[in-house]
Amino acid sequence: MVKLEVNFAGIEMKNPITVASGTFGIENAQFFELDRLGAIVPKGITLNPKDGNPTPRICETASGMLNAIGLQNPGVDAFITMLPEYAKFKTPIIVNISGESAEDYAELAKKLTATGLVAGLEVNVSCPNLAKGGSQFGADPEETKKIVRAVKTATNLPVITKLTPNVTNVAEIALAAEEAGSDAISLINTLLGTAINAKTRKFEIANVTGGLSGPAIKPVALRMVWQCHNAVKIPIMGMGGVTSAEDVIEFMLAGATCVAVGTYNFVEPDAAGKIAADLEEFCKNNNISDINDIIGKVEKL
């Protein structure tokens, strides 16, 4: 038997596999049993409904995808009515929250905590596709602290700060989140990029810039997870280009306690479930009896 259970900032997970916010929803239950996952992270939620950015807002890139959705969502009150559907599964729900001010984040935390159906809050200070908030907060250590403190005062749930890779020193932001009381961090969010059509001579997406995700960003994500693991003592949720159980192992060796599958969910809607099943087989074949034993254990040549 392989022990796959992990404790992520107080959240008991049956295995280290979760999903990246914005890539997964209750609809995926038609493709596989969601109880196969260690945790579920639905689409990011804001205080009020958001229509998102104008279309086109997504395009395929080499080994990845560029998106500028702009956090389209029905707002927290409407989302709360959907929570019982998620709660039917025996899998912790971590809700990703975004706001334009510290007060927005605090109000979101209060509302979601009051439901009694949420296991943790992922504080998004890293979305690159917003005119206000998002990575504007996550690029500044003091703003990051301000947001984290506001959320911590409004909830008793584990607080996970989602970091942006679009900074000079990601470890500095991770430390700021830890100092403000964050129980964990998650990274990376998407890398800022753009795409141009050589024939039409126009940008591929209306927002001009968007967030790059998929296998193309995995080396950057691994590096940043490793850097943050060496900078902070709180646990890490790693993500960025995960398509296999082997990718999960690599992120855990770099220092992640759990790992999110993101863009690959658009390629295979049951990808996260398959990876969760493959992970146990990988551990058996590679003499890993307890997956916790490999966290942060990458070695230099």
Image (spheres, rainbow, N blue to C red):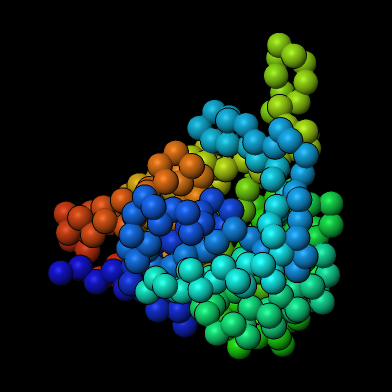
Q: Is residue 251 left or right of residue 176?
A: left
Give the residue furthest to the top: 199
Q: In percent of the image, x 75 and y 79: which residue is there?
A: 106
> Can you see residue 185?
no
For this view, does 179 lie left or right of residue 265?
A: right
Total numbered circles: 0
Residue 99 lies, with reference to residue 220, above or below; the image says: below
Which residue shows up at 70% across the image and 37% down it? Answer: 57
Location of residue 91 (image quadrant): bottom left
User: Horizontal and vertical percent for residue 205?
Assistant: 73, 32
Residue 162 in the image, given as x and y percentages of width and height: 62, 64
Q: Residue at x 70, y 54 (%)?
A: 71
Q: Residue at position x 46%, y 74% from top?
A: 87
Q: Quadrant of the N terminus?
A: bottom left
| 47 left or right of 264 in image | right
* Residue 167 locus on image (x, y percent): 72, 53
Residue 77 versus residue 110 in the image, above or below: above
Determine if residue 41 is in view: yes
Q: Nearer the viewer, residue 164 or 34?
A: 34
Viewer-nearest residue: 186 or 118: 118
The part of the image, by quadrant, that contains residue 144 is: bottom right
Provide residue 14's location: percent of width, then percent of height. 33, 72
